[in-house]
Image (cartoon, rainbow, N blue to C red):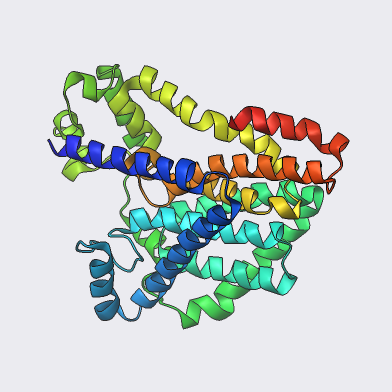
Amino acid sequence: MADYKAFFANAITILTCAFYFNHFVGLNKRRFNISVIIIFLLLSLSMLLMILDHTQQGIIDPLRSTMLGEPVKQSPSGLATTQFTFGYQIAAFTAFVFVATFTFKLHTIIKVIVFFACIVCLYLGMNRSALISFAAAAVIFIFIYYKFKAVLLLAAATIICFLSYTYLLKDTLDSKNNILSKNEAKGANDFNRANMAEENLKICADYPFGLIFYGKTWEDVTYRNPLFTFGLTSHNAYLMFITYLGPFLGLGLLGAIYYRVTRLSREIMQHVKLRYNALMPSLWFSFIAVSLNALSHNGWLMSADGPTLFLYFGVMQGAKIYAQQQNSAESSGTLEPAANSAAQDRLQTIVL
């Protein structure tokens, strides 16, 4: 019964988010921009609470519980009950602000400050998958934006990270609760996630049509498996998604969910340096970061975890607004029609 309640709660959340973007935001660019600003101000607040939680846990934890409406389970963290859920927020926030400093063509000093702030959030956030997701999204973006010059920029970023850790982070911030100390603790007594994924695939083979069609829950099929004690899973949202729905329905839904976002990526990347298109690459890479983060955690789009839903519908609706804006600019003569009509037609075909 609890699974059905969670399903309907998540369905309501997804439908509400879809209704908000399609009917309230619509093609109104001002409402869209305000919505993005609000969600990332909330994520900024979450990052600030996480940083303060390292030194003021007695004050911050009750505040987190009050704001979330339920007891917190892990600390230090931000506006999330667990560090796992908070990892989605870190991945989304850091990828967005990092890419935005380039697409909005901010000053180099601001880029360095924002990059350092991202490193601090990742260092204190104690979430290895968020770090990997941010690094992957950042490297892909830098190569798209600068092409071969990206090698020099990545070398400079590596030097900044090394100097920041050696002279600032190591001695001035929490030496006990950080991503490096967590990695050392995990390394001393860690579970093999490759073996867990293998066991998960065996469960898929035993129930090829998905657990829900056999009337089974995860606990029903893993209670004798020593790798999945106490409700532990393979920590892969996509694999768990397929486990419950089966490879046929699960892979089909995954393809449907990511199809349009994947098609949009080409048009977004082709216009990555255009100022009026600056917000779209930031949102898209933020969504890519949380999608990569789902490879190491259960929470994902269909469980309404973190900012993933907002980013998914935001990218889709932002593409429609961008297509309309490009059309209006072309009609008014501010863009060269011959140079942009083909790209506009492709984008409108994708988003409609």
- Measuring 72% from the left and 67% from the top, which residue is drawn there? 106
Q: Quadrant of residue 237?
A: top left
Residue 171, image x, y percentages:
48, 81
Is 123 placed left or right of 64 in the picture? right
Is 344 placed left or right of 264 in the picture? right
Establish if 149 lies above or below 180.
above
Along the line of sight, which residue is nearer the eye, 186 or 98? Answer: 98
Q: Quadrant of residue 244?
A: top left
- Measuring 63% from the left and 48% from the top, which residue is drawn there? 280
- Measuring 30% from the left and 18% from the top, which residue is drawn there? 205
Along the line of sight, which residue is nearer the eye, 287 or 73? Answer: 287
Along the line of sight, which residue is nearer the eye, 166 or 161? Answer: 161
Residue 25, image x, y percentages:
50, 48
Residue 164, image x, y percentages:
59, 74
Establish if 293 lies above or below 197.
below
Rendered-image quadrant of the N terminus: top left
Is residue 20 visible in the rendered image? The answer is: yes
In this rendering, the count of numbered labels is 0
Is residue 136 visible in the rendered image? The answer is: no
Is 178 placed left or right of 221 in the picture? right
Rendered-image quadrant of the C terminus: top right
